[in-house]
Amino acid sequence: MRGNFVRGAGYLVRGAEMLSHPALRKFVIIPLAINILIFAALLGIGFAYINALVDSLLSRIPEWLGFIEWILWLLILLTVGLIYGYCFTAVTLLIASPFNALLAEKAEELITGEQVSGPEGLGVALLMVPKSLLRELKKLLYYLPIALVVLLLSLIPGVGAIAWLLLGAWMMSIQFVDYPMDNHHLDFSRVKQAIRSRRLSSLGFGGFVALCTSVPLLNFFVVPAAVVGATLLWCEELSQT
């Protein structure tokens, strides 16, 4: 497999460092505000259900297996955290996708020093909402059948957490790399092809994003950092394929 897993994870860190640049700062505010509102809503709705789910699963453990309860706690929390992180990110991106495309455009111009023929200005970004929603729905339709298989694998103790992590890494790469590639009018099939061409770098980037989105409060800032990080990944590796 081509690419470098550690370098791929580093794109998220570098993306976060670039967010403070004056040329990008104003394009981060709207997605960040959307992230906070969605997080508060999902947390309020989902907290009771997560507690009930964890209690239900732990109540099924036979007494003679009580010594592995703490391991199951870790696996359950990791799985729930990954699922929550992806759902949070998916809803956020569905709403904020036009602004993320604009952020990716400005980040690429900053990285390369060249003009990108993407959306110019917040007004144009708002006009792109219908197109952006269709693009996000296409990614969702790609994700759902795979998620169903992973959900079935979750019935096997220990396997589910690993499967969700791999799926999260793959989908997060596709999700965020799609922004700079869409700005270049490349279709969704080309996005998947590009990710496969540098699989290790893409999985390193996507895996780190997936883990960070499962951490409360940190996930507020992951989305804009991941947009810029994916743009770095596109400029430095994927655009060459």
Image (tube, grey):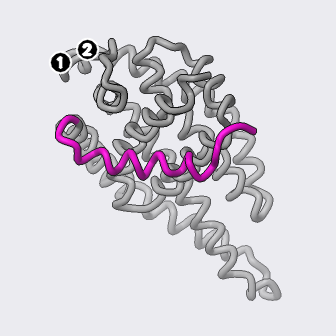
The image's mark for residue 123 is 1
Identify the residue at horizontal 44%, vertical 14% (top origin). Answer: 184
Identify the residue at horizontal 60%, vertical 48% (top origin). Answer: 204
Residue 204 shown left or right of residue 21 in the figure: right
Residue 98 visible in the displayed image: no
Identify the residue at horizontal 35%, vertical 49% (top origin). Answer: 16
The image's mark for residue 127 is 2
Element type at mark 2: helix
User: Residue 75: x and y, percent?
Assistant: 66, 68
Q: Quadrant of residue 158?
A: bottom right
Residue 166 shown left or right of residue 80 in the figure: right
Which kind of residue does numbered mark 1 sit on? Answer: Gly
Please provide the residue range marked out in magenta: 1-23
The image's mark for residue 58 is none
Disc 1 from disc 2: Cα separation:
7 Å
Residue 220 shown left or right of residue 201 in the figure: left
The crowding category of the residue bearing disc 2, from other C-alpha atoms within 10 Å (few below 14, some 14 to 19, many at least 20), is few
Which kind of residue does numbered mark 2 sit on? Answer: Leu
Residue 16 higher or lower than 179, as above or below: below
In-front residue for pair 40/120: 120
Element type at mark 1: helix
